[in-house]
Amino acid sequence: MRLNNLTPTMLLATTHRMVGSSAFRAVGSARSRRVAFMSSPLTNKAAVARTSTRLTETATSASPSSTDTPAAATGAGYPFSTIEPKWQSYWMKHQTFKTPDRRRSPNKKKYILDMFPYPSGAGLHVGHPEGYTASDVMARYYRMTSHDVLHPIGWDSFGLPAEQFAINTGTHPEITTAANIANFKRQLQMLGFSYDWEKEIATTDVGYVKWTQWIFLQLYKKGLAKQSEVSVNWCPALGTVLANEEVINGLSERGDHPVVRLPLRQWVLKITEYADRLEKGLQGLDWPAGTMVAQEQWIGKSEGTEIVFAVDGMDDQNVTVFTTRADTLFGVTYLTLAPEHPLVPLITTASQKDDVEAYVTTTSSRSDLDRTSNKDKTGVFTGGYAIHPFTHEKIPIWIGDYVLGSYGTGAVMAVPAHDERDFEFAKKFGLDVKWVVDSKEEGQELFKEEAFTEHGVNINSGEFNGLTTEEAKKAITSKLSEISAGGSKITYKLRDWVFSRQRYWGEPIPIYFPVDFPNDVDPATVDPKMDGCEHTIRYDKPIPVDEADLPLKLPEMDDFSPGDDPAGCLARAKEWRYFQKDGKWYARETNTMPQWAGSCWYYFRFLDPKNNDAAFSPELDEDWMPVDLYVGGAEHAVLHLLYARFWHQVLYDLGYTKHPEPFQKLVHQGMILGSDGEKMSKSRGNVVNPDDVVDAHGADALRLYEMFMGPLEAVKPWQTSQVAGVVRFQNKLYNVVQSAVQNDSSVAMDDETTKILHKTMKKVTEDIESMSFNTAISAMMVLTNHLTTLKDKVPREAAEKLTLMVSPFAPHLGEECWNLLGHEESLAYHPWVEYDEALCVDNTVTIGVQVNGKKRGEIEIPVDANQDAAMEQARNVQTILNQVDGKEVTKVIYVPGRILNIIVK
């Protein structure tokens, strides 16, 4: 059953079934009044319209009046259950957060972006809104500081979980995805985020898939997309290739299914051609230092030497290695190849064949990560030998699972004396150890019970003896170049991106291939869709789909199970796979793109989501790019950011964007743990649903608490009991405003209130700019407590300024208080508060006074008071006078503004 065939009733019933009864409540409940089954790109429009109408009926034709809400008497709680849905309705009806037209605006711009979520069936837990709240605070603040703001949201909606659910239940993944999106959208709107919902996208939208496929074609035309036989982690049960991180001890992380290593035809994106650009492009970005380091390490630039070893007895075969320690070349006592190295079957002798084949078979079930992280190094001798390029000695060739065929040359030269791993391997298998680097320290003998890995001076290295490590590296590299046995080389740890997935729920790769038949067969008389029709798909002759024919849509299928065919389940959709064109037969590519594809460029589509003629317009690229603030989890510090930067740089080279990097400033929110200090998960039973918190305390309370828990970047545990603290603050602020409303507008501020207000405005402004939200809220709490002490003398000016400051954090509360204060328009674009720097400076300071080093009292003195003035004031404090009266003052230590220490005897 396809989504576009659903009736509104069927869609609502299906959605309720998919997301559970918590998604939709009876009309009388607080949550149901907040719920808006808004138009998702995947949802049925009629159902959307009916449900949306129910919500917007509460909105008035103009600004909501404070009389719409039963006025709470001063001292009563804040009635969030009626106020929050009222303002959500207002924002929606008036399109308050619609993205402005930059061509008509003199303002500076701010593109504020969240890493868009994967809409899982579980919905949000309270950890998810942390980053969304932080970005929303900034978006609201920037609107109030005369910036044009683009703040969109969408859905990274392709993914294996939806497909697995489809396989297990028979529910089409499109239906599952639509239901999940509806639930996520309900939750995000319930929390009052100021997204421009007109910009909403989903990577599963046909219109979005079209341009993802278009970008793939640009990569293909530029020579950056190719087919390759790649040794991959194939999971027959899941029917897909798994990343190394998804394989644990030979089993899939999801489901514990067996995984085998086998060569598959894969589409590969040549990201390695951009390795140097990707590293250099990090310069000048405002990113967390840890993320910058992680990117640099993943790219892994190394400058060293390539060395070619001839294979003994095989004139046309060589083993090439890369090393950063060419100075140790004379210490090589064996070479190690990856078990999957193509030379292995050629150099393996008959006597070693059984051992080698058994070892290769065992290794094939282990992931790259498992192999390299295993401390117990294993290996087998092949029986073959290589020739040392300088000494011409024969060097045994081994295979070892710690060497990867997909990394570097798939071979390493082993120098046990000067490499810890090689030393352990040599000791285990009784291989020679040759010492060729000595310490620079005179008279210090090498300790030969462990590898010496430091730099030093070459020994036992022929003409290179006596050279320092750096000198020997250069000299040996130069010599290798002279004899055509190697030379200098820059390599990268980064590997090309395996881009194929053997699953259904992903973007079809827009490539097809010719189909050949036996010579005596007329193509017009056969049909490759029929069983038994002999034919060959010419994978060596890929043909790109014409751009005018995009999007290439997924076929209708009832069975999404992968089976054990590495070609994927799409290979069974023969009516879709095979087609005729100009009298010839062709076969479509049956691999789909990985989930990374849609998230590589979504920030571009947000600029122009309804453009049918281009992925995005150059004018909007110029108006809004790059992203000014990108907020998301640190778990995406490497792959997503690296892949997105790669696609962006390709589009930059092709002239589609004027900006070389996509994300100028990056912020990672810290993880919110369960109350037990562990990561939230269903299995641990520590997940907190934001719906429950909002039902009990309101959306603003949740937002305030998440920003008040601690520094944004810190990891912190959720404590439901502590939400009560921000609820008290919320209630106090609401009551303070009501007091100001009931006062005569002529009530003036006293000096103390004026100073506290201006200090708070300065503190909150600076803290928002630095995203120090917890301390900003703390400062507003102090101001609110002070205003509470004024009782019925709260100045209207102070209440208005406090309302403006709290509004980015608690927008419903802010709007309601602004409305109570007599303003008809939303405060969303009202100018931000301004403080007087002179009023933020204290004229006096309180310092401690010590007598003989022990504190005896405090004095309040002018900030510029000298020592004599401080001593005079100290003598007026009885507790201090008691300690010095009648005694000789032998010394006075005075630190202005900090302390006065009187020494007496």
Image (cartoon, rainbow, N blue to C red):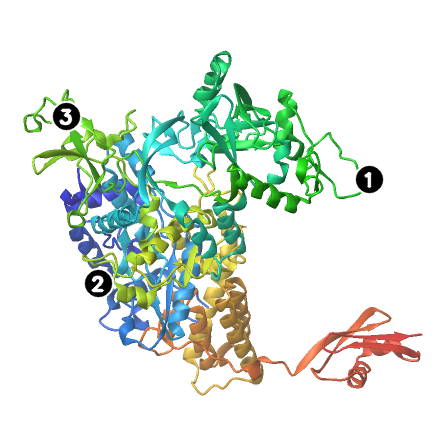
Q: Quadrant of the C terminus?
A: bottom right
Rendering coords of residue 687 (x, y %): 44, 43
Q: Dot 2: what SS? A: loop
Q: Nearer the viewer, residue 120 or 158?
A: 158
Mark 1 Cα shell of 10 Å, populated few (<14), some (14-19), many (≥20)? few
Position of residue 165 relative to residue 65, above or below, is above
Q: Dot 1: what SS? A: loop
Q: Which residue is farthest bottom? A: 746
- Mark with earlier residue (3, 2): 2
Tag 3 residue: 517
Contact (Cβ within 8 Å) of mark 1 with mark 2 = no
Tag 2 residue: 57
State the CA–CA distance, disc 1 to disc 2: 91 Å
Whether residue 397 is visible to the viewer of this picture, yes or no, is: yes
Q: Quadrant of residue 868?
A: bottom right
Tag 1 residue: 443
Which is closer to the viewer, label 3 or label 1? Answer: 1
Rendering coords of residue 501 (x, y %): 31, 36
Residue type, mark 2 in image: Glu
Mark 3 Cα shell of 10 Å, populated few (<14), some (14-19), many (≥20)? some
- Mark with earlier residue (3, 1): 1
- Mark with earlier residue (1, 2): 2
